[in-house]
Structures are given as structure tokens and as C-alpha cells.
Amino acid sequence: MGRVPTHPLWRPYELADLDDVAKARVSGRSRPVVVVPYDDGWPARYAEVAARVRAALGDRVLRLDHVGSTAVPGLAAKPVIDADLTVRDSADEPSYLPALEAAGFELRVREPEWEEHRVVVTEGPMTNLHVWSPGSPEPLRTAAFRDWLRSHPDDRDAYGALKVELAGRGFSEVMDYNNHKSAMVYDLYERIFTADPAHQHDPQPRA
């Protein structure tokens, strides 16, 4: 009998290289890590951002989703809206970036080697807008993670408690903070993939 395949969205457990993170940053500095209780106003702030993006790009928006912890009711989070934007080609910055800049966004991160990922930011409200191309698995991963936490309050609360504890350590680099969350995040993805009725998954526990 053949081995059960891993889930198509599975990724090996690994930590971000902070030197690579620094090289990918085009402008600005990482915001200090502050985690606050869930704010009922976060969905409205996302809606404000989404309206600005859609007004700026029109039909160049192929998909736009509220993701990250601010998209999970009841979850403690950094007070920064995260959204995934899919455009025709995220590597083709001239096709979308000038319009977003005119709408008050600034390019912060460029990662050609990671699915041509870009991050543009705005401060009002504080937002990280992650830009992807069609077929990128990362927006599917973040949506699955969000949906799991929305429907599994025990996992949501455990994840929130870890975030609060880590924020108390005073991280100045958000990716360093993310590295310290990565073990729990990986384990949660293992639960997500194992429970997915659409795909088989051979469990891949961390070493």
C-alpha cells in the first residue's frame, strides 16, 4: 500500500532567517510587538481598508480577504489588520503599486523568492496588505488557519495565551516573535490538515 500523501498546503517546520527578513524590508522598521484583547471594531477597520483597496484597483482585485488574528472573534492580537490581496501578477508592481500608493499605502516588504510576496502597509488603520498571485498557496493556508480558530475555541484561546505571553517579552522584531509562535502554529496546521475531508494527510510531527 502506498504512503498517504501530505496535504497540498503542508510546509516543513522551519524558522524565519532574521537576516533574510531584514534584506526583504524595503522601507520602514518593524513595529514593536504589542498584543491586546480582541476589539469588536476590527472587522469595520478591515472593511474600511478593503473599500480603499477596491476603489484604488477596481477589477485588478482578484481576491481580498481579512486574515490573521484580527479576523478571529475573541482572539487577542496585535492591533494591525492583516489582509490577503490577490492580483494578476504580484511581481508586476507597476500594475498595482502606484494605485495603492496613491491610496495611502507604502511598499514595506519584497520577497520574490517566496511566492513573489509583497507587503504594503498603511497607518490609518494600521494594516499589512499581503499581495499574492493566483495559485499561491499562502492565502489558502492563512484562510484555513483563520477558519480553524474561528470554529475551535480551545485552540483559539491557547494560541491567544501564547501570543500574550510572548508579547510580554518585549520583542522589537515581529518575525522574531513569529518564530517563537511557530511551533504552536505548525502543530495547529497539522490538526487542520488531518481534519480536512478534501485531502488525505500523512501526519508530519515536528522533530
Image (tube, helix red, strand yellow):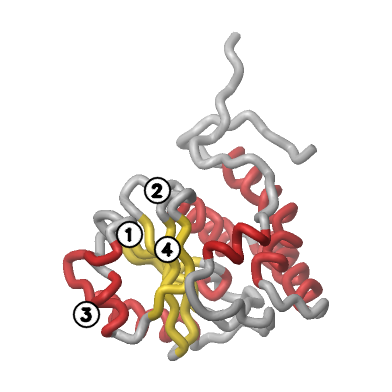
Residues packed near mark 4 inside 10 Å, few (<14), some (14 to 19) or many (20 plus): many
Residue occupying image coordinates x 60% and y 62%: 21
Give SS at disc 1: strand
User: Residue 170: image x %, image y %?
Assistant: 78, 80
Q: Which mark is residue 27?
A: none
Taking the image as shown, residue 14 lies to the left or right of residue 199, namely right
Residue occupying image coordinates x 44% and y 68%: 119
Which three-letter amino acid code belongs to the residue tagged 2? Ser
Taking the image as shown, residue 123 lies to the left or right of residue 161, namely left
Residue beneath label 2, please? Answer: 136
Residue beneath label 1, please? Answer: 86
Residues packed near mark 2 inside 10 Å, few (<14), some (14 to 19) or many (20 plus): some
Are dots 3 and 1 in contact, CB under 8 Å?
Answer: no
Which three-letter amino acid code belongs to the residue tagged 3? Ala
Whole-Å distance between the Cαs marked 2 and 1?
9 Å
Are dots 2 and 3 in contact, CB under 8 Å?
Answer: no
Residue beneath label 4, please? Answer: 118
Whole-Å distance between the Cαs marked 2 and 3?
24 Å
Which three-letter amino acid code belongs to the residue tagged 1? Thr
Taking the image as shown, residue 163 lies to the left or right of residue 10, namely right
Front residue of this view, candidates 125 and 44: 125
- Mark 2 or 4: in front is 4
Whole-Å distance between the Cαs marked 3 and 4?
20 Å
Residue occupying image coordinates x 44% and y 78%: 121
User: Residue 192: image x %, image y %?
Assistant: 59, 46
Q: Which mark is residue 55?
A: 3
User: Residue 142: image x %, image y %?
Assistant: 50, 57
Can residue 41 be seen from the camera position used here?
A: yes
Specify which label sits upstream in the sequence, 2 or 4: 4
Location of the C terminus by quadrant is top right
